[in-house]
Image (tube, rainbow, N blue to C red):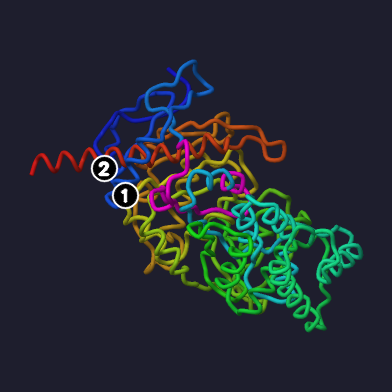
Amino acid sequence: MADGVLAPSPVQNSFVRSPLTHPFLFANFSVAAVVLPYWSAASTQYLRRSCVTMASTHCSSPPAGSFFVPQSSPKPSQQPSLLVFSGGTAFNCVAEELKKVTTRVAHVLPVSDDGGSTAEIVRVVGGPAVGDIRSRCLRLSDESTSEAIAVRRLLGHRLPLDASDAKSEWYRIVEGEHFLWNGVSRPYGETIRAFLAYFQNQILRRTSDSFCFSNGSIGNFFFAGARLFFQSLDAAIFLFSRVSQIPTESLVLPVISTNDRLTLGCELWDGAIIRGQNEISHPTTGFVQTVNKVYLQDCSSTIALPSRIKRVFYMSSEGSNLLHEIFPEANASVLEQLSTVDCIVYSMGSLFTSICPSLILPGIGETIASRSVPKVLLLNGSHDRETTGLSASGFVTAITDALNRTYGDPHKCLRNFPSDYINALLVPKDGQIPVDVGCLVAQGIFRVIMVDSINDPKVGTVFDPNSLINALINLIYHSVEEAMANFNSSEKAS
């Protein structure tokens, strides 16, 4: 059998849950189709005109159904639209390439990260974590002019690790004397400096808390200054997007629109509760801070979690003695985008601390289940602390449980099937996560597509960005083709 893609025999509207007896075929590349009645004829015509076949690196000639890549960018209104649930790191390299194909992408990010320089900002001035949002905004920022590059370089700069050196460099930047201001025009410079200075003023007012600038991100400081000034996270994102000249069709959306600090918690299958995203995913001390239903305590543990994660949830940031679960509302803009996009993507990355925090909110599962569009899970190339021992179907189960809110309030949980949330799985070639086809079939998932990968020296096997984008666009392309075919058939029948 050929190496590559697991794909079912052709069926009408193959994204609809099929019988478990549905046969599988092996092919190098295959895509499924879904009805997209809201996609314009202009979009379809564009794809038909401008798509070219790419040969696979796995085979001597491109097979039927191979990937398609637009030769030139269409008008934004004709581009396919996607919504991506992700964290602030794993999808970044893909985001930079994806914007060359379509700018109509809504990037949904959590605001519960409590690590890195974000942790210091939250500790001193409070508010939601902005690091993941800042990171994605920078990846989407304009690079077409020398000034755009200079602005990106400034906002992407990190201060030295040494606290004294970091503070000294920070003062030079705020005072406009640093070389990073070279190439930034006066209007841009004055705008950026104003919010950096406002952030500086705010931390000076917190006389009881000394701020540590070590390894601080200038972009995070600008973001925090704007949020504090406007008292609005959405306004800060809007300002950052305009300053960094992100295309207006590209949206960076916090899954929760709030001006308050949010704390992520998780419950393990052994009953233990861990407080804080950083403690869940990669505690720097080698210890896990746990909390039971009554009190907080520090207990020694190995780096590996003592038990698998059962669920994640939001905890109150007020006090530290009692476990207090809270239920924030999803950002209305996220729900609006979910209702209209051509494709929904669950990114690779930290499953329980980057992806699931965006899925557990009321309204998210309901909206996704109601859509008849490609709903694509991008499988990680390797395990991490959160997913040790999980197979591909285990990832699907975790996402399904999060969207169904299975282990939360029984009166508010859903009963949807895995295939209501995921109907295609993209797998990096040579990845380490076992792809248990039989279990995926039992879950109603019949599209498993192998995608070219590259080796990242830091994290191992990851998707090749261009191949991944091609696979996603190909899914949308074929869904439009089927929609047109179904429409023509219904017209003839009537």
- Quarter holding the N terminus is top left
| Cβ–Cβ under 8 Å for marks 2 and 1 | yes
- Quarter holding the C terminus is top left
**Residue located 58% across and 35% down the image:** 464
**Residue located 75% across and 68% down the image:** 120
Residue type of the residue flagged with mark 1: Trp
Mark 1 is surrounded, within 10 Å at the Cα level, by few (under 14), some (14 to 19) or many (20 or more) other residues, namely many
Residue type of the residue flagged with mark 2: Ala
Residue corresponding to mark 2: 483
Q: Is residue 437 above or below residue 85?
A: above
Q: Is residue 281 left or right of residue 48?
A: right
Q: Is residue 137 above or below residue 202?
A: above
Q: Nearer the viewer, mark 2 or mark 1?
A: 1
Q: Is residue 281 left or right of residue 444?
A: right
Residue corresponding to mark 1: 39
Q: Secondary structure at mark 1?
A: loop
Q: Is residue 265 above or below residue 29?
A: below
Q: Position of residue 118 (x, y in %)?
A: 71, 65
Q: Position of residue 133 (x, y in %)?
A: 61, 61
Q: Is residue 25 visible?
A: yes
Q: Position of residue 346 (x, y in %)?
A: 49, 49
**Residue located 29% across and 32% down the image:** 22
Q: Is residue 311 visible?
A: no
Q: Which residues are magenta?
A: 70-95
Residue closer to the observer: 442 or 348: 348
Q: Position of residue 465 (x, y in %)?
A: 57, 38
